Image (tube, rainbow, N blue to C red):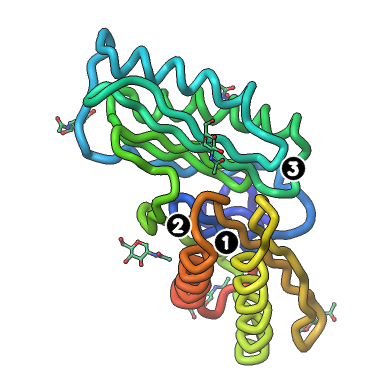
Amino acid sequence: MDMSSWKWLPNFILLLCLINLVSIVKSQFPTQIFFHYECLDNGNYTSNSMYKTNLDTVLSSVSPNIDTNGFYNSSMGKNSDRVNVIALCRADLQPSQCRDYVKNATVEILKKCPNQKQAVFWHEFCMVRYSNEPILGILANFPNESGHSGQNVTNHDAFYQELNVLLDSLSAYAASSSSPKKYAAATRDALGNWTIYAFEQCTPDITSEECGDCLTKSAQQIRECCDGAKRS
Ligand SMILES: *[C@@H]1O[C@H](CO)[C@@H](O)[C@H](O)[C@H]1NC(C)=O
Ligand SMILES: *[C@@H]1O[C@H](CO)[C@@H](O)[C@H](O)[C@H]1NC(C)=O
Ligand SMILES: *[C@@H]1O[C@H](CO)[C@@H](O)[C@H](O)[C@H]1NC(C)=O
Ligand SMILES: *[C@@H]1O[C@H](CO)[C@@H](O)[C@H](O)[C@H]1NC(C)=O
Ligand SMILES: *[C@@H]1O[C@H](CO)[C@@H](O)[C@H](O)[C@H]1NC(C)=O
Ligand SMILES: *[C@@H]1O[C@H](CO)[C@@H](O)[C@H](O)[C@H]1NC(C)=O
């Protein structure tokens, strides 16, 4: 495996509907984390503004307060100075791991997006997002990103047949979950000699229907982006 190649996205295929996550993951954690972020062009703030003060305060509250389900939302300020934040950890993390990843993300997001009023930062283990507009309970399909390992499957048709079965059943399971951790994970043997690993998760603030729609769309995007690719 070529760890230095950016093409080796990670050892998984990742797609994130901003507040929703679908990935095909290996059971082992990767040694390298691939960060993604987007600074949205919806207005900027200055370093001595009230927005900046509120943003710093609200971001510093994320890691200490994120709940045991790995979700957090908070808002601060009034009118044009109001900042809304949400954060999500991958459902299988320990609370201490979640806090560490989120702490890192709340610092990194400001480095990546130093003056934009809206930004999102995510990787395989967590997501942090803030905005001057309401975000809690609102499904966002953008920004999103998908990618593949650069390696191809040999038994293409059989692989996609099994992958579709796996992703569809996980979407249904994650979306209908009554737990605040809306996720599902499973493996499926593809014909041949290997196993497909998959993991899907939504934030708990959107409806089951929205979660299901997002995951179904995301699975479709994975098929389109990565047709023929196999995770390493
Ligand atoms: C906000 O700042 C970025 C650079 O940091 C700039 O590219 C963008 O045009 C600015 N947007 C507005 C609305 O001023
Ligand atoms: C966040 O984690 C990355 C990767 O582990 C590391 O390179 C970076 O320095 C960390 N940033 C902070 C602010 O801790
Ligand atoms: C995988 O398939 C694509 C398209 O069919 C091709 O361009 C690419 O070189 C292949 N990659 C490998 C590692 O064989
Ligand atoms: C796995 O299957 C592929 C073809 O499907 C074959 O080329 C490869 O040698 C097999 N590997 C092992 C370890 O059996
Ligand atoms: C968002 O935060 C409020 C205030 O702390 C809390 O009452 C509410 O349960 C949170 N919503 C979710 C979906 O976690
Ligand atoms: C990703 O964003 C693009 C562009 O906004 C959109 O067309 C697409 O439907 C989004 N993908 C998903 C899975 O929502």
> Circle 1 is placed at which residue position?
22
> Circle 3 is placed at which residue position?
93
How many labels sit on residues? 3
- Secondary element under disc 3, as helix, strand or loop, is loop
Q: CA distance from mark 1 to mark 3?
A: 16 Å
Q: Amino acid at mark 3?
A: Leu
For the N terminus, give its image quadrant: bottom right
**Does any atom of ligand 6 lie closer than 8 Å to the CB of label 2?**
yes
Kindly check if marks 2 and 1 are in contact, taking CB atoms under 8 A apart as contact: yes
Q: Which of the two discs, 2 and 3, labels the residue nearer the N terminus?
A: 2
Kindly check if marks 2 and 3 are in contact, taking CB atoms under 8 A apart as contact: no
76 or 107: nearer the viewer = 76
- Image height of 74 relative to 11, above or below: above
Q: CA distance from mark 2 to mark 1?
A: 8 Å
- Image height of 23 relative to 203, above or below: below
- Secondary element under disc 2, as helix, strand or loop, is strand
Q: Which of the two discs, 2 and 1, labels the residue nearer the N terminus?
A: 2
Residue found at x 42% / y 28%: 75
For the C terminus, give its image quadrant: bottom right
